[in-house]
Image (cartoon, grey):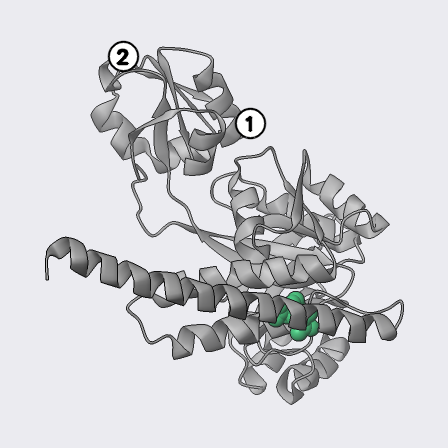
């Protein structure tokens, strides 16, 4: 058999598999429509988007993946299939911190897939307002974002908002040098958010020691400015390169390759248990010796692992601080429930911000 014949044979097999896949995906979509009908029959309060079910499906796909495709890759494909199925049930409107091309947009699409209607907003407070008003079903906001430096703003919003956390998204952050210039020698200015410039300092010192570094509001804004010049570049994401038709002069220029940032999904409800969950809460204690220790003791007693603690001024008294704490476990689990009962006695303030599945993708 010639190599052309061999190729033809494998391609025919691929065609047959694609026909099967198409039939199966269509069958799955019809099931989603059937689910929607059942949910519709339950009336007003029904939830079309089920974060716990999605997390469960994606975890199973990753665990059962036989290869040769990578587990993350396969889960991403199923993420998109589910996103399209959900859009058949009810198209979701998701607000994110814009403009287009930001890492928060990438986080929103990573979490919900591309079939949602994703809408950019200019400020974190706008996203909270839109979700509170019901104009958006969910919002995606940065919380530990080393790139855009807005973590405190998000945390502050939770102090006054009734919204709950329905999910988390983690994103590996890669910075690229984007430009219209033909090569590095032609770059005289580099725009980016100051945090991104700082994260690429070593690379910039080495390869662009004479270029002026200009700090701007967002990396998407930097890409926009670089697109308007022949001798400028931006440190920004791949999405920004596509959006502003810029060439990638250098890839992955961050000094720290493991740079990951975290985003939260906010909504009017949190998520039912998925099997691997986190609970976020806001705690405050009297400003006295041992106060913080007493606040954290219930978690240790219940064997709960704490994944994060941040402190912020409460703005209600000069020395009053509130603590944002994340623990592993769902608030309906006996351990978290017991810790919360104990905390109610020990803390001035104990506000549960929500339980949600640990990020799968
Ligand atoms: O199981 C459901 O409740 C569905 O609506 C189906 C489905 C899916 O495609 O598997 C779609 C959307 C939900 O967010 C979760 C799962």
Q: Which mark is residue 186?
A: 2
Give 55 or 166, whichever is nearer the viewer.
Answer: 55
Location of residue 253 (image quadrant)? top left
Image vertical order of residue 97 relative to residue 91, above or below: above
Q: Label 2: how many residues lie within 10 Å, few (<14), some (14-19) or many (20+)?
A: some
Res 291 seen here: no
Image vertical order of residue 166 relative to residue 64, above or below: above
Nearer to us of marks 2 and 1 is: 2
Give 285 or 220, whichever is nearer the viewer.
Answer: 220
The answer to whether residue 315 is left or right of residue 199 is right
Location of residue 98 (image quadrant)? top right
Q: Position of residue 37 (x, y in %)?
A: 79, 71
Q: Position of residue 165 (x, y in %)?
A: 68, 62
Circle count: 2
The answer to whether residue 1 is left or right of residue 199 is left
Mark 2 or mark 1: whose residue is earlier in sequence: 2
Q: Position of residue 313 (x, y in %)?
A: 68, 50
Give 226 or 142, whichever is nearer the viewer.
Answer: 226
Residue at far left of view: 2
Image vertical order of residue 217 relative to residue 343, above or below: above
SS assignment at label 2:
helix
Q: What residue appears at the point 64 percent right and 79 percent down from the top-left corner? A: 273
Alpha-carbon distance for marks 2 and 1? 24 Å
The answer to whether residue 117 is left or right of residue 74 is right
Instruction: Identify the residue position indicated by label 1 in the image.
Output: 217
The answer to whether residue 106 is left or right of residue 234 is right
Res 79 seen here: yes
Q: What residue appears at the point 53 percent right and 37 percent down from the top-left corner? A: 102
């Amino acid at each position: 058999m010639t190599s052309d014949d061999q190729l033809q044979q494998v391609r025919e097999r691929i065609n047959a598999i694609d026909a099967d896949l198409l039939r199966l995906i269509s069958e799955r979509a019809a099931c989603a429509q059937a689910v929607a009908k059942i949910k519709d029959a339950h009336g007003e309060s029904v939830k079309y988007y089920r974060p716990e079910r999605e997390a469960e499906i994606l975890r199973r796909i990753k665990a059962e993946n036989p290869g040769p495709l990578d587990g993350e890759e396969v889960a991403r494909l199923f993420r998109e299939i589910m996103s399209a199925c959900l859009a058949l049930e009810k198209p979701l409107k998701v607000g994110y911190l814009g403009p287009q091309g930001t890492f928060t947009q990438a986080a929103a699409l990573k979490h919900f897939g591309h079939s949602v209607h994703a809408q950019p907003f200019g400020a974190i407070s706008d996203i909270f307002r839109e979700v509170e008003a019901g104009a958006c079903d969910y919002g995606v906001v940065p919380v530990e974002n080393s790139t855009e430096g807005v973590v405190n703003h998000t945390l502050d919003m939770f102090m006054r908002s009734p919204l709950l956390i329905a999910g988390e998204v983690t994103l590996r952050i890669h910075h690229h040098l984007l430009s219209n210039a033909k090569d590095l020698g032609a770059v005289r200015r580099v725009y980016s958010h100051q945090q991104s410039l700082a994260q690429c300092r070593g690379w910039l010192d080495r390869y662009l020691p004479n270029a002026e570094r200009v700090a701007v509001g967002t990396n998407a804004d930097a890409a926009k400015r670089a697109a308007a010049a022949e001798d400028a570049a931006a440190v920004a994401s791949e999405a920004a390169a596509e959006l502003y038709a810029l060439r990638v002069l250098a890839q992955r220029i961050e000094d720290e390759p493991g740079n990951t940032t975290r985003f939260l999904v906010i909504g009017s409800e949190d998520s039912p248990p998925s099997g691997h969950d986190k609970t976020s809460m806001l705690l405050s204690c009297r400003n006295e010796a041992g106060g913080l220790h007493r606040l954290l003791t219930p978690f240790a007693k219940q064997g709960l692992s704490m994944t994060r603690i941040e402190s912020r001024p409460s703005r209600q008294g000069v020395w009053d601080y509130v603590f944002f704490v994340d623990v592993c476990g769902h608030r309906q689990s006996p351990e978290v429930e017991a810790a919360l009962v104990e905390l109610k006695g020990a803390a001035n303030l104990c506000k549960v911000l929500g339980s949600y599945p640990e990020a799968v993708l």
